[in-house]
Amino acid sequence: MNVAIQKLNSSWLSKILLMGVVLTLGASSYAQITAPPCATPTPPIIGGTPSICRGESAILSATGCSGNVIWNTGQTGNHINVQPQLTTRYTALCRTAEGCLSCFAEVWKVTVNTPTPPIVAAAESPVCSGDMVTLTASGCAGTLTWPDGSTGRSIAVRAVQTMTFAGVVCTEKNCPSSPSVPIEVAVGQPTKPVLSVTQSIICAGQTITLMAGNCLGVVRWFDGQVGINRVFTPTQSRSFRALCQMGSCQSDSSDALPITVNAGNLRPVLTSTTFTNGCPYQTADLTQAVPADKTRNPAGVWLFRTRADPASPALQSPMAVETGDYYLFLQTADGCYSKPITLSAQIAPCTNAIAPCMSNPARVVVWADSLNGSRGSVVLQAQLRGSATSSQWTSTGTGLLTSDKSVSTRYLFSETDRQRGAIVFALTTPDPDGNGPCAGALASLTVAVPLANSQTGTEVVGLGKMVFEPTWLPNREVELVYQLTIANMGKNPLANVQVVDDLDRAFAGSGARVQSVTVRADNGWATNPAYSGQGADTTMLLAGASLPTGAKQVVRLTVRLNIGQANTLTFDNQAHVNALDVNGTICRDVSTSGNDPDPDKNGNPGDNNEPTVLTLHSVAAEGDVFIPEGFSPNGDGINDNFIVSRVPAGTTMQLRVFNRWGNPVFEREKYQNDWNGTANVGVVSGVNGQGLPEGTYFYVLTLSDGREYSRFMTLNR
């Protein structure tokens, strides 16, 4: 062990040797002195105080040295006095008069006993004046001593006015801790709570959150519940009251908070719930379930669904379904849903039958969602329609498709692709009936290959960001946990690693509010305690860390989010990392989705920066574009036109509408939200331009930016 210690401290020993040589030389020339042979002395033996309390001193002694004892603290002599604040190890060596040095002595450890200050909590706060309050201390394995000299885990005090308690000490192994952190016990008179609710008029089965403010004590509800906030699902209209309790005192009752529950047992009147086909067709029309007489049911919107849940996927083709059970809901004008009604379709065999896929042919639309020259990639998107259920991508290029069987894929261009200049992508769907009369769908897209930006060669730091499954909390809050993985992918260590994440950009623009933020880093990395993720001065969640070559570090960011006022439930977020390489050059990277900063494994994390997308709820495929499920062109000034909203500025629309037989009834190349339910193509009751009858129609809406939406709408009069 002496040899190992001597190697670890060679720099320190060389300084001591040099000092000895200088003292021996005096005023003589270095070149005229020849050092005598050195006999290595025996290392000293250290002894002394083995343990102390923090703030006390320890005396160390060294024996067995015929010369001068030199300690690792810089002190000299056979005895020294030390006052360590933490447990510390000491060693020494022996230097003879001739300047010869021994090996290091065996290490002597001085243990500093430092009990953790206890944590004191009050059984109640605030309380009424004159109440007895029990204070309890925890976190101490030894003896607890209170300021009045008493000992034990808890004491009882009378609270006459607001007061602060501090100074509880924990003694372990005869060593006292620092005094406990002060706590305050508030004394006051309770005031009656002020009640509020997230929604005062609801549908049966809907959950609400009741909230009580203006109470510094305990909120007690008249139905026996306790707490400031409570999640509740009322089954009938009723009123709520609460009071505020502080110790033995309680306030007057709050004002009544009425909650109105609309009936949820509505069962719409239908023409039938069982449907069959009409030969030669092999599909049934479920839209015939809706009565033509609108007065038979409350005003609302009819929803055809695949499951007995109004939030389940919509039935894409209710006018052409095969054998099975489907579900119909009526969503009333106040937003409530009826009970689900099961619609059964039974398909009878037909002579010379028309295959179902002939009535509902496979269709597919493709477009380039994003093109990035610096990354050398393109993201391709597609939508399957009709009887299409699966698909496969192909290309004329030699690059890499990250997923060839998904409607969304990413393609990485090759150098050969760049020389070609353009790549053709195709998406095909299989034949839905094999050797039958139907055929699969095909859509193609030509993409110009972007020129790559020049590489600086400094992208040696990478950042990946993934989000875990969110946790829903009361009051329309959700807890999100992001995991950031920082990787050093270069050949040298990195210094001054800084990670920035602007939560304002991710959430505030959509109306969501960040309630709290917690950052945790592993392996001793220090986070920024002032980080809130909001504002230009608080976006850096850690700084100043170092990262060895080939190392990875994980940082977890927990965000508590209120989405009560959010206009979307889909959020994308990206973080940034900066670091200094050995030449003082700044290396940067933008996070990519996932825990691997370099998912394409090309050694360059700079070409991967997909945002980390989180969807808290199933959102319609059209994103910001809003398309109604129907309209009512009856001249009452309400929903008389088919209005498509939230269309990006400068984007034009093309609208084509078809009846249940697939015949076009309306077409407009540059649609201006002016369709009032009249036909402008085809023949309807022999009169072109006549108002179309009530019912379900199919439409195709194409935007000039390449997006296309096709689905059914309901026309009511």
Image (cartoon, helix red, strand yellow):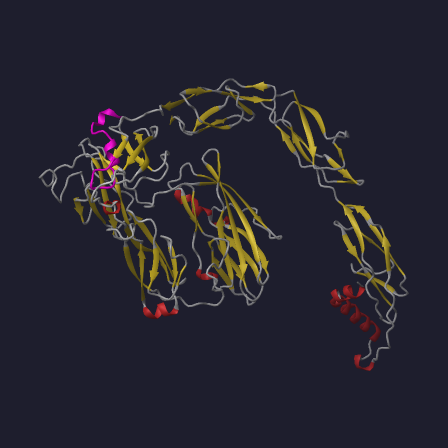
Asked which quadrant contains residue 392, the reply is bottom left
Residue at left offset 40%, top offset 20%: 237
Residue at left offset 80%, top offset 51%: 110
Q: Nearer the viewer, residue 334 or 178?
A: 334
Count of numbered badges drawn on the protein = 0
Residue 227 position in % (x across, y down): 53, 26
Q: Nearer the viewer, residue 219 or 187?
A: 219
Q: Is residue 284 above or below residue 446?
A: above
- Based on the picture, tell me whether residue 291 belongs to the magenta stretch: yes
Q: Nearer the viewer, residue 44 or 624?
A: 624
Residue at left offset 50%, top offset 26%: 214
Q: Nearer the viewer, residue 63 or 397?
A: 397
Residue 699 position in % (x across, y down): 23, 44
Q: Is residue 633 above or below residue 90?
A: above
Tell me the quadrant of the picture where the N terminus can be found: bottom right
Residue with the most extreme top position: 252
Tell me the quadrant of the picture where the C terminus can be found: top left
Residue stretch rendered in magenta on the structure: 276-297
The answer to whether residue 56 is visible is no
Residue 354 position in % (x across, y down): 22, 45
Q: Is residue 231 above or below residue 323?
A: above
Instruction: Name the dominant secondary structure of the magenta segment.
Output: loop
Residue with the most extreme front position: 351
Residue with the most extreme left position: 686
Image-based side of 523 in relation to 644, left or right: right
Asked which quadrant contains residue 117, the reply is top right
Residue 398 position in % (x across, y down): 37, 66
- Based on the picture, tell me whether residue 419 belongs to the magenta stretch: no
Asked which quadrant contains residue 38, the reply is bottom right
The answer to whether residue 554 is visible is yes
